[in-house]
Amino acid sequence: MADDHDECPGKGKDLVRLGDPEGGRLCPFIRHRADCSVQTGFLRKVREGEPILAGAIELGNPQGDGVYEVLSEVPPMVRESPGPAKVATDAYRDGWDGIFGKRTVGEA
């Protein structure tokens, strides 16, 4: 009996085949993972200052015919809690007091 994964492209490699960019920014892809599962979607280049909401992958050198090997993967960012980021920590407050001194209420 033939192995179920005989038709899997790359056999054990994580490969991405890119399509033609749509609108100059998004590029459709088909990803054949090392475990022979398949993922489809759109890729865009990561730009400095923009959030990475859906994760990111680093592509290696072209393998030919729009196929690239996936070198690494950054998972999507997950927020710990809803609401704005906490910026005033105890260490921040201690440093503030050390530099500017403690405020005294009622002093003019």
Image (cartoon, grey):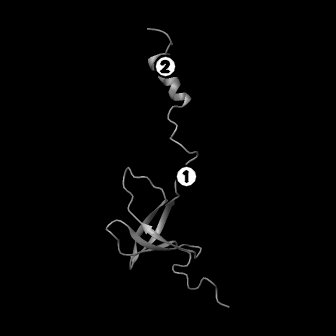
Farthest residue toward the right? 1
Q: Residue furthest top?
A: 108
> Quick check: 18 above or below 95?
below
Residue denoted by label 1: 78
Q: Is residue 27 left or right of residue 85?
A: left
Q: Is residue 42 left or right of residue 77?
A: left
In the picture of the structure, the residue carrying the numbered disc 2 is: 98
Residue at position x 34%, y 65% in the image: 25
The quarter holding residue 18 reads bottom left
Give the quadrant of residue 60. Answer: bottom left
What x and y, as percent, mark residue 96?
47, 23
Counting residues from the start of the chain, the first of labels 1 and 2 encountered is 1
Vertical order, 53 against 102 (above or below): below
Q: Looking at the image, is 39 positioned above or below residue 57?
A: below
Tags 1 and 2 in contact by the CB under 8 Å rule? no
Farthest-out residue, bottom:
1
Relative height, residue 58 to residue 38 (above, below): above
Spot occupied by residue 24 in the image (x, y as percentages of width and height):
31, 67
Local secondary structure at mark 1: loop
Q: Nearer the viewer, residue 103 or 97?
A: 103
Viewer-nearest of discs 1 and 2: 1
Residue 18, label in figure: none
Amino acid type at image mark 1: Val
> Tag 2, which secondary structure?
helix
Q: Residue drawn 36% across and 55% down?
A: 47
Residue kind at label 2, given as amino acid type: Gly
Residue visible at 52% across and 53% down?
77
Answer with left or right where residue 66 lies relative to residue 9: left
